[in-house]
Amino acid sequence: MRAVIVMFDSLNRHLLSPYADTFVDAPNFARLAAKAVTFDNFYAGSLPCMPARRELHTGRYNFLHRSWGPLEPFDDSMPELLKRAGVHTHLVSDHPHYWEDGGATYHTRYSTWEFFRGQEGDPWKGVVGTSGSHQQDAVNRTYMPTEAEHSQTRTVDAGLHFLETNVHADRWLLQIELFDPHEPFFTHQPYKDRYPHDYDGPEFDWPPYQKVAEPKAQVEHARYEYAALVSMCDRSLGRVLDFMDEHAMWDDTLLLVNTDHGFLLGEHGWWAKTVMPWFNELVHLPMFLWDPRTGGRDRRRGELAQTIDIAPTVLRYFGLEPTPDMQGNDLATTLGHEAVLFGIHGGHVNVTDGRYVYMRAAKDPANGPLEEFTLMPTHMRTRFSPGELKEWEPAEPFTFTKGVRTMCLPAAPTYMNPWQHGTLLFDLQRDPAQEHPIADDDVELRMIELLRRLMVATDAPASQFERLGIPREGAITREHLLVREQRDRAAVVAEPLPAIEDLRNSALLGTPIVELLRIAGAKDVLAAEAPELTQSELLAAPATLTLLDLARYGYVPAAVLRRIDERL
C-alpha cells in the first residue's frame, strides 16, 4: 500500500476544466479527472494556510479555538500516526510557512522531509538593505533564472526522486506540496506566452488583500499571470501522472490531489482572501481522489466532503483507525456530511448544507469576546509578545485536548471584522455566484440550528457562541436572526470600489489621514462624511493610513469615498 498526496495552495476550481468552461490551459487536470473521482462539493474547513494544514493532519476543525499556529501537543497527526505504525512518510515542499514560528511543528511529524527555498518573500538570500517581503521576493527571483531552478520544479524533482528510489517498496506516503499557485504569481516567459494580451501597466503579479481599485486592464493582467502559474502547476501534476503511468502504480497507490483554499481575482470586488467573507471561490475546492479500494475512474461525487476527511481516509487506507478526536469521514466508506463548517478565527463562522451557505457575523461591532486557546503561543511569523502573555489564564480541558488545560488569552485585534460585512445567506441553487444574498427567516433559523449543532460537536468555546449571539443551549428563536438586521450595512460594504483612475482627487485620498486632518477644508469634509475618522481613536492607527487604505479594507464604503472625492 502506497499513497501520494499532491497539494497545491490557492488553487481555484472555477478555472479548471473539470469544473468549468475556462480559458486556463491545464490539460493534466482534465487527464487526472479521467483517472480518478472528481468531488463536486468539497469544502475547506479551517482557514487559511496553516489552519488548513492542521486540519489535514488532525481531521478536525481548529478555527474556533485558535488562529494561525503550530500543531498542539494534544493534536493527533495523521503522518505521525502512520510513521508510528511503520509507514514511511516523506514531505517535499516549497511552502515557506512550514518553517516560520507559526508552522514549526508540522514537518517534523513526517519520517523525512525536504524543503526548497525562495517563495513569497522567504528570507532566503541575503542582500543588505533589503526590507519587506516584496523586496526579498525580487531578490529571490534572481536566484531562479530558469524553470529548472524554480522552487516548484525543484520540489517536484525531489518528489519524483523519492518515487524512483522507493517505487518497489511498500507502506509509504509521499506528500508533494507546492506553494503555487499562491501569490506572487512568478513564472517564466513560456507560461506567460500562453496568455498573450495587451498590457502596458505596472508589474502586477502580487495582488493585495484588499478591495479591487485597479483599472480593468490591470485586473485582467493579474488573472493571466495567475493562469500562467496554474499552467505551470499543471505541468508539475503531469510529471507525477506520467511516473504513475510508466510504473503501473495505479493498482496499489492512492493518489489525492487537493488544495487548502482558492484566491479571489476580482470576483465580488475583492483580491485574495481572509479580510472579506469566505465566498465559494475561496472555499469550494477542487479535489480528486484515486483510491484502489473503491476504484472510480472518470467519476464524479456530489456529496458534501471537506478537508477534515483527508486524515481519516488516508489512515483507513493503510489499515489504521482514525482517532476519537477526528471529525472527518473515510471517503471510501461514507456518503458525506449533512452540513459542514468553515471559517477563519475571528471571522464569519460559516455553515453549508450544499444548497445554502450561511455566514454568521459577530452580533456587535466589537467582534468579541474572542479568545485564543493554545499551548503553542506563536503567530504566523512571531511569538506571542510578553504583553499578550501577561493576560493568559488556564482554561478547562476541551474534549479533544486529552485532559490537558490550555492557555486562554484575548485574541489580538486585526483588520478583519465580520460585523462590518454583515450576516449573509446565499441560495447556491438559484445564485451559484453568490451575487444576491437573501433574507429568509425560516431558512436562517434552520441554518443557525445546523451551525450550533456543529459548533457544539466541535466543543467550541463559550466565547464563540457569545460573539455570534447564539445560545449554546435552549431554543433558537427569531430574536437570534441577524440577516435582516445587518443587511443594509452588508450591502453598503459589498459595493465595489471605483477604479483609482476614475477618482478626481486620488492624490488627496492617498494622503495619510493624519496629514489630511491638518488641512482645514479637508478636515471639514471628513467631519461631515466620515466623522469617526476625526475621533481620537485614529491616534492608534498607523501614521501612513489613508482613506484609500480604509476603503480597500471595506471600512470606508464606496459611496462615502465618492462623496468625499467630490467634495475634496
Image: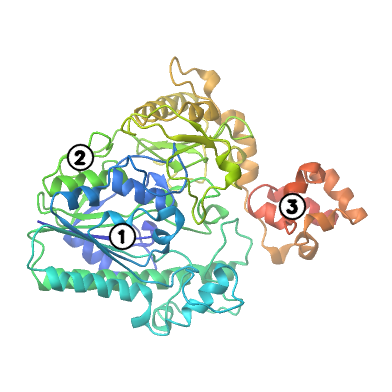
Residue at 39% x, 84% y is 146
251 left or right of 510 in image: left
Q: CA distance from mark 1 to mark 2?
A: 21 Å
Q: CA distance from mark 3 to mark 2?
A: 52 Å
Q: Which is nearer the N-term, disc 1 or disc 2? A: 1
**Labelled disc at residue 526:** none
Residue 388, by quadrant, is top right
Q: Establish if 466 lies above or below 46.
A: above
118 left or right of 361 in image: left
Q: Amino acid at mark 3?
A: Leu
Residue 198, by quadrant, is bottom right
Can residue 424 be seen in the rendering of this structure? Answer: no
**Residue denoted by label 1:** 7
Q: Nearer the viewer, residue 409 or 448?
A: 409
**What secondary structure is found at the residue carrying circle 1?**
strand
The reply to whether callout 1 and callout 2 are in contact (CB within 8 Å) is: no
Q: Position of residue 168 (x, y in %)?
A: 7, 68
Q: Amino acid at mark 2?
A: Pro
Q: Establish if 66 lies above or below 470.
A: below
Q: Establish if 241 lies above or below 265.
A: below
**Labelled disc at residue 322:** 2
Can residue 127 be seen in the rendering of this structure? Answer: yes
**Labelled disc at residue 561:** 3
212 left or right of 59 in image: right
